[in-house]
Image: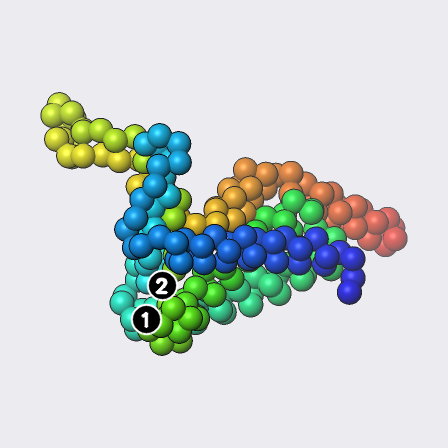
Amino acid sequence: MNNKYITPLAIVLSILVIDQWVKYYIKTHFFLGEEVNVMGEWFKIHFTENYGMAFGLEFGGKSGKIFLTVFRLIAVSFIGWYIHTLIKSNAHKGYITSWTLILAGAIGNILDSIYYGVMFHYDSWFHGRVVDMFYFPLINTTIPEWFPIWKGEEFEFFRPVFNVADVAISIGFIAIIIFQKKFFAEENKKETESIESAEESVS
């Protein structure tokens, strides 16, 4: 194996092992809906499951679940191919790592969807529920009556419950957004140098 593939592969395997171990532990040691305070009221372990996307979002019931899983498999295949092309073209290591995190997270949640239903004896293949557990209700308040909209309603931030795979996906996307100039600066430099080299050879 080319040494350039070792780090991305190690990242994917590490995240998958951690993600699946945490999910299995929560699934086998907590009852659905059980909640434990880790750091006061603002960081909790809250066991929940969902049929859908990241952060507890859902999509179209059981038929939507099949569609979503197939779509994820296609997306994961594309991302894997894209990472392969980035490695071959000597792209910025940070950019490769970011996409590797996204790939690992996507695979982690796909595994839940594919076999958790069969493994835990509650549904068929491809109908497993994604296990979530990290809950950060940092702000719990009521919107003031003077506020123009949603006045008097309860407000909570951060409401979604998520897992290790979701964290990997989020870090990957955030890194790409924040560091995109740095990631692509080297590539733009290479393109400029190749154009200048081509122009010199023609002249």
Q: Quadrant of residue 100?
A: bottom right
Residue 122 numbered tag: 1
Where is residue 7? Give x, y as percent.
Answer: 70, 53
Give the vertical position of 169 relative to 152 (above or below).
below
Chain-order first, disc 1 or disc 2: 1
Residue furthest to the bottom in view is 124
Q: CA distance from mark 1 to mark 2?
A: 9 Å
The residue identified by callout 2 is 129
- Residue type at mark 1: give it: Tyr
Q: Position of residue 170 (x, y in %)?
A: 48, 46
- Quadrant (top left, top right, bottom left, bottom right) of the N terminus: bottom right
Residue name at image x 32 percent, y 36 percent: 137
Q: Residues within 10 Å of mark 2 (few under 14, many from 20)?
A: many
Q: Is residue 40 above or below residue 9?
A: above
Q: Position of residue 111 (x, y in %)?
A: 47, 65
In the image: residue 24, left or right of residue 14: left
Q: Position of residue 47 (x, y in %)?
A: 34, 51
Q: Nearer the viewer, mark 1 or mark 2?
A: 1
Q: Is residue 125 above or below residue 20?
A: below
SS under mark 1:
loop
Q: Seen from this angle, which residue lies furthest top?
A: 146
Left or right relative to 195: residue 103: left
Looking at the image, which is closer to me, 177 or 10? Answer: 10
Query: Which circle marks residue 47 in the picture?
Result: none
Q: Residue at x 39, y 36 (%)?
A: 38
Visible in this render: residue 19? yes
In terms of secondary structure, where does tag 2 sit? loop
Tell me the amino acid under the disc marked 2.
Arg
Q: Is residue 56 visible?
A: no
Within the image, what quadrant is residue 52 found in?
A: bottom left
Q: Are marks 1 and 2 in contact (CB under 8 Å)?
A: yes
